[in-house]
Image (tube, grey):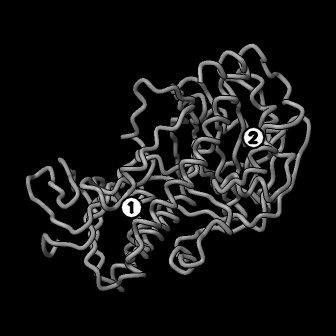
Amino acid sequence: MTGSNYDFAIVGGGLHGCVIALALAAARPTARVVLIERDAELAGNHTWCLHADDVPAELADVIAPAIAHRWDGYRVAFVDHERALASPYVAVTSASLARTVRDACARSSLEVCTGLAVRRLNARRVVLADGRAIDATTVIDARGPDRYAIAGAPHGYQKFVGLELALARPHGLTTPMLMDARVPQSDGFRFFYVLPLAPDRVLVEDTYYSDDATLDRDALTANVHAYADAHGFAIDRVIRREAGVLPLPLASTFDAARAMPVADHPLAVGYHAGWFHPTTGYSFPLALRVAALIANAGADASAAWATATRAHTTQLAFATRLNRMLFRWFAPADRHHVLSRFYRLPEPVIRRFYALRTTRLDRARVFVGRPPKGLSWRSALTNRKAA
C-alpha cells in the first residue's frame, strides 16, 4: 500500500470484492481503491457460472476478460424427462477472475493487497491484524459466506465436491449438464453437475440439497470417479478439487439497512450480507448488480439503493418460501420431483428465476397447478402455520 487514505477500501477478495473492484476500476479509474484479501491469492478456488444475459450491459466489457468458458446452452436430466435449454451459459474461474483484477491495476488506481488479515472495520476505517489502519471514504465489507450467521435460523444446505478432470481421450460433450438427477436420491435432492471445459477436460460435481451440513469429501470424491467411469470419461489425472457447503435459508434474514451506503457502518455486500440466491446459491448476477450500483452511484445513490434493496427483499421472500417447500414439504428422497416440475416451465421463467428477477406471474406459476409428486400435505399445512 502506498498510503493509508483511499476513496474505497474493499475487504474480501472473493467474488463480490473482485467484481466491485473491477467495476470501480472501469468507471472511476482515478479513484483510489484498495482490495484487501486475507489469503495469499484472490478469488479462492471456485468455478462460477451464470446465464450470459444476466450480465448488466454497463459491465459487459468489464467482466468479459474474466469469462473463461462459453456455451450456447445447457441441459438438465431427470428420471421422467430431459431437456435442452437455449440460454447462453458462461463460466468464470478463480484464476480468470484474479487475473482480470490484476490486469485492471495497470489501467487504474486500483491496488491489491493479499495476505492481510483484518481485525475490525467500520464505515471509514479498516484496522489490520498487525495494527495498521487504512482510512477510506467508503469501506465495503465483502467477506465471504463463512461469516454468514445461521445460529437460530432454519436452513437447508447445498453441498458438493467437484473434480476438474484431465481425460485420456475426448469426452464428446458440447454443452454443460446443469442437473443430472438420474442418480440414486440420497441425503436430499442429489444431482451431478458437468461442465465441459475443453475436449479432454471436464468438471464433475456431486451435489446435494440436504438437511445436514456434514460433507463427506472422500465419499463424494469416490462418487465423482464412479460417475465419470459410468459415462466413459477416461480419467488421466485430477487437475483440481473444489468443495463447499452453502447454507440455504428457509426465511430471509436480509437487513436492507446494512445495504445502504449512507449508514454509519461498512457497506455490507456478498453472501454474508444476504446478496445471494437463497435457493441456488448463485451469487454472480447479484454481485454484478451491486457492483454496478456502487461504481455508478451519483446524486441519486440513496434512491437507487433503496429501489434495489426493496426488489431484493421481494425476491428473497419468494425464494425462501420455495426453500421451505423444498425442505419442509417433501421428504429428502422426493425433492427431485420439485425440480423436475420446475424444469417443465417456460425457459424465460427459468432464466428469470436464476437471475432472481422473477415476476408476479413467474412466482404464481411455480406454486400454482398440480403439485409435484411426494408432497406431504400435513407437512405443508404444519409449516405454513408455523411460518
Q: Residue at x 43, y 71 (%)?
A: 99
| Residue 45 in picture, x, y percent from top left | 46, 52
Residue ID for mark 2: 229
Horizontally, is 88 left or right of 69 in the view? Answer: right
Q: Is residue 369 above or below residue 271?
A: above
What amino acid type is highlighted by mark number 2? Asp
Q: Secondary structure at mark 2?
A: helix
Distance from label 2 to label 1 (Cα)?
38 Å
Residue ID for mark 1: 17
What amino acid type is highlighted by mark number 1? Gly
| Residue 196 in picture, x, y percent from top left | 71, 58
Horizontally, is 16 left or right of 11 in the view? Answer: right
Q: Residue at x 57, y 35 (%)?
A: 159
User: How many residues crowd around disc 2 within 10 Å: few (fewer than 14), some, or many (20 or more)?
Assistant: few
Q: Residue at x 85, y 48 (%)?
A: 345
Lower position in the chain sequence, tag 2 or tag 1: 1
